[in-house]
Image (cartoon, rainbow, N blue to C red):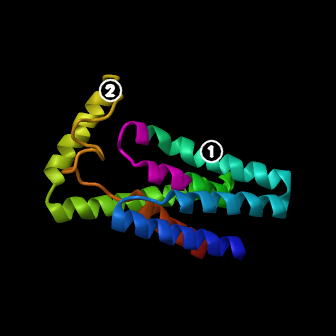
Amino acid sequence: MGLTVLILLSATIAGYFDLRWHRVPNWLVGLTVAVALAWHTSVSGPSGLWSSLAGLLLGMGLLFPLFLLRGMGAGDVKFCGALGAALTYRHLFAVLTISLLVGAVMALYVILRRGAARQTVRNLADLGGRLLHGQIRAHPVVGIDNPRALVVPFTVAQAVATWIFVLSR
């Protein structure tokens, strides 16, 4: 029960910070990771520690390429690692899958609200063409460095997904 409260509290705070200030505080990520590692170690010993560490590395490793391509911020990546440490690698994929679905719904809302459906389709076609031709690098228009780009705070999607996951168990 104690770890569940930590996970939900941490996800909620991280989502709020990302929505409000477009950043996730390092102190929150560090605290979440430290408590998760200590919790899993105290409950399950070395195997708990390894499960938690594997979740941390997997969470960060899966999203890190998107950070390198400037499609996602560092806070999103770090917080996914913190969630991985708290949930362990066993549950990370479920929460990440839900996060992607929530993020897709959020993105669709932003696109429709801004009337950007045509431009979004053109951008996706351009991205797809670049990938097919082996041009794997940050896009000049579709990235978090472009202040005019439509962005979705992914940590908010992770927070909603965490609540959905925890409440559905």
| Above or below, 2 relative to 156 | below
Residue most toward the top? 133
Q: Which mark is residue 57?
A: 1
Mark 1: which secondary structure? helix
Q: Main secondary structure of the magenta part?
A: helix
Residue most toward the front? 27
- Disc 2 marks a residue whose amino acid type is Leu
- Calculate the distance from the C-alpha at mark 2 to the C-alpha at mark 1: 29 Å
Question: Is the residue marked by circle 1 packed among few (<14), some (14-19), or many (20+) residues within 10 Å?
Answer: some
Looking at the image, which is closer to me, 130 or 30? Answer: 30
Q: Position of residue 64 (x, y in %)?
A: 49, 41
Q: Residue at x 21, y 40 (%)?
A: 141
Looking at the image, which is closer to me, 8 or 37? Answer: 37
- The residue carrying mark 2 is 132
Q: Quadrant of residue 16?
A: bottom left
Q: Residue at x 37, y 37 (%)?
A: 69
Which residues lie in the magenta part? 67-80
Question: First in sequence: mark 2 or mark 1?
Answer: 1
| Above or below, 28 relative to 49 | below
- Disc 1 marks a residue whose amino acid type is Leu
Question: Is the residue marked by circle 2 packed among few (<14), some (14-19), or many (20+) residues within 10 Å?
Answer: few
Q: Is residue 128 left or right of residue 158?
A: left
